[in-house]
Amino acid sequence: MHDIVIVGSRCAGAPLAMLLAGKGHDVVVVDRATFPSDTMSTHFVQPAGMTRLAKWGLLDDVFATGCPPITTARMSTGPGEELELEIPLESALPGLAAPRRYLLDKILVDAAVAAGASLAQGVSIDSVIPDGDRIGGVRGHTADGAFEARGRIVVGADGRHSVIAREVAAPFVRDEGSTSAGYYTYYRGLEADGVETYFHDDVFCVVAPTNDELTLVGLAWRQERFADLRRDVEGNFVATLDRLGDIGERTRSAERAERFVGSAELPNYLRKATGPGWALVGDACYHKDPAPADGISDAFRGAEFLADAINEALSGGDETAAMADFERRHAEVAIPLLEAAVRVADFDNTPQQRLEAFIEIRMHDAQESAELVASTSDA
């Protein structure tokens, strides 16, 4: 019988396991993947996420992968309408970063194990185990047979298609649907010293350097265009870049190094995050359009908030009150950012309106990063 069973061991589940194991709790974290492994993600980490990596002692590990620090931003709302600036950073940060997920997730998983968490890889969870009016564990399977893990609290950190959310019938608190669809890939030989974001009439684009001297390039269009775009992904991708300015020419002179990855399922929602014996975190609980590139930072924040609540509950506190406090703290941050992200991704808004919503999110992020630094210094 564990204290906590966490289903999902990526950007929400692994930090949660690390934080709780570091408090002395018996934690098992389960994932159907084995690590290192990749996952669909444009993997840019904003200041609050980078600050948490520094706080957890993992920032040097991220940059040790060879992922370049990013200190400048270029934003465009149309041809010839561009702004370049230095990214305001806390002193502890040499820059932002876009580490590949097969590297970042392995760092997080290793940190959880080093803190004392048990890791069960290659496990697919099929159902939860009822325990009276609570959830008491999970059942699943591996390539070798059945799997079962019981715990006082079961956490679903298992993504948008969360088995735990399905099994407990977690309702949506907010569901704003999906407005965009996108593809991304990687180029070798594409010069990009900083992050570039393009808010043009019918497209959003992000460009960022990553590991192995590759550059991430992602594009998003109106969701209803996805069926047509997928008939010729590369042709549509390159033609769209040509309309954005010099990024088209720069991409054409580079070499595409990996396949295209895309989706028309980019929802914006917040689910109820707790119940008797269970909780949700990360994309299982909260997901918004990837245009603001907040997914990793959101997962880190949710993991930290939930770790505080579970630690309180398992340390003699009132579980119901602790979990309610987590939901309140999480929603207070999540809902305004969700609303802003919907405005960023809504192509019925003007490019300037979308950029303004993006800047609103970035201002919140900068403030959160500063508060994290201050709280860490005080501690």
Image (tube, rainbow, N blue to C red):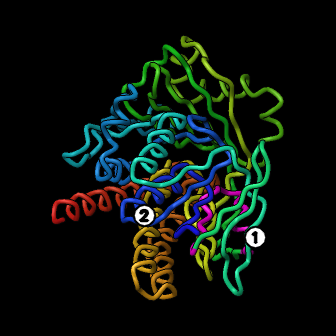
Q: Secondary structure at mark 2?
A: helix
Numbered marks: total: 2
Q: Residues within 10 Å of mark 1 (few under 14, many from 20)?
A: few
Q: Is residue 21 left or right of residue 185?
A: left
Position above or below: 309 against 147:
below
Which residue corresponds to mark 1?
167
Q: Quadrant of the N terminus?
A: bottom right
**Which residue is more in the foreground, 45 or 322?**
322
Residue in view at x 65 percent, y 42 percent: 33
Q: Quadrant of the C terminus?
A: bottom left
Which residue corresponds to mark 2?
20
Q: Is residue 243 left or right of residue 162?
A: left
Marks 2 and 1, how far apart at CA: 24 Å
Q: Is residue 105 left or right of residue 7?
A: left
Q: Label 2 is placed on what type of residue?
A: Leu
Q: Which residues are magenta?
A: 152-169
